[in-house]
Amino acid sequence: MDSDSTPDSGPIRPTDDEARTMARDLMARSRFAALGVVQDGLPVVSRVAFGLAPDGAPASLISMLSQHATALRAAPDASLMIGEPGPRGDPLTHPRLTLQARASFVDHDDPAYEEMAAHWLRDHPKAKLYIGFGDFHFALFSVTGAFLNGGFGKAFFLTPVDLGLSEPS
């Protein structure tokens, strides 16, 4: 996906600093997301907790007993949509960001788990009720591309670098 789209590319605008800022702000303030996975060849969408890892990568605290965790373990390619309609107006005029990503898991025995848990609890204090349960693990999402719909007539393709992330390895 090229963030330098041209005006001839249909409704997609060239990515600019305003789009980058809007996307980064959505990532920073979102606390839940719609997670799209593929299970048995069919799409499945779930609502999950959303936050950022200490390095700024998208993350979720997920029960391994869930359908979406099972699907991610089998096929780690996923999509996350963040951004919610505001209290007024047409829901389609409010910004939303779709992240295309590949999931990996941070299990309890991983040395990074403690740091991740402390970081997560700063933004998700109610998670202290279940963060220590053995079936809860962190899913980290390595973003490969993104699409920002900033409202009517404001559509942009973004790269991981546009989001302040490193390119996936």
Image (cartoon, rainbow, N blue to C red):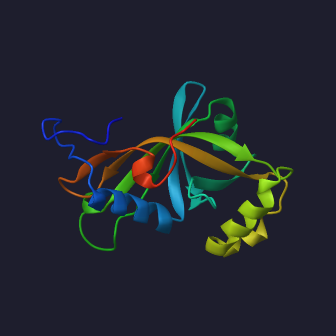
Q: Residue furthest top?
A: 41
Instruction: Specify the quadrant that holds the N terminus.
Output: top left
Q: Residue at x 16, y 37 (%)?
A: 10
Q: In this picture, is 48 found above or below 143? A: below
Q: Residue at x 54, y 38 (%)?
A: 168
Q: In this picture, is 87 found above or below 164? A: below
Horizontal and vertical percent for residue 143? Answer: 51, 43
Horizontal and vertical percent for residue 29? Answer: 48, 68
Relative to 28, 65 lies left or right = right
Relative to 88, 119 lies left or right = right
Q: Residue at x 83, y 62 (%)?
A: 132
Relative to 150, 124 lies left or right = right
Horizontal and vertical percent for residue 159? Answer: 40, 44
Q: Residue at x 53, y 61 (%)?
A: 32
**Residue 54 figure quarter:** bottom right
Q: Is residue 91 visible?
A: no
Q: In this picture, is 73 found above or below 113? A: above
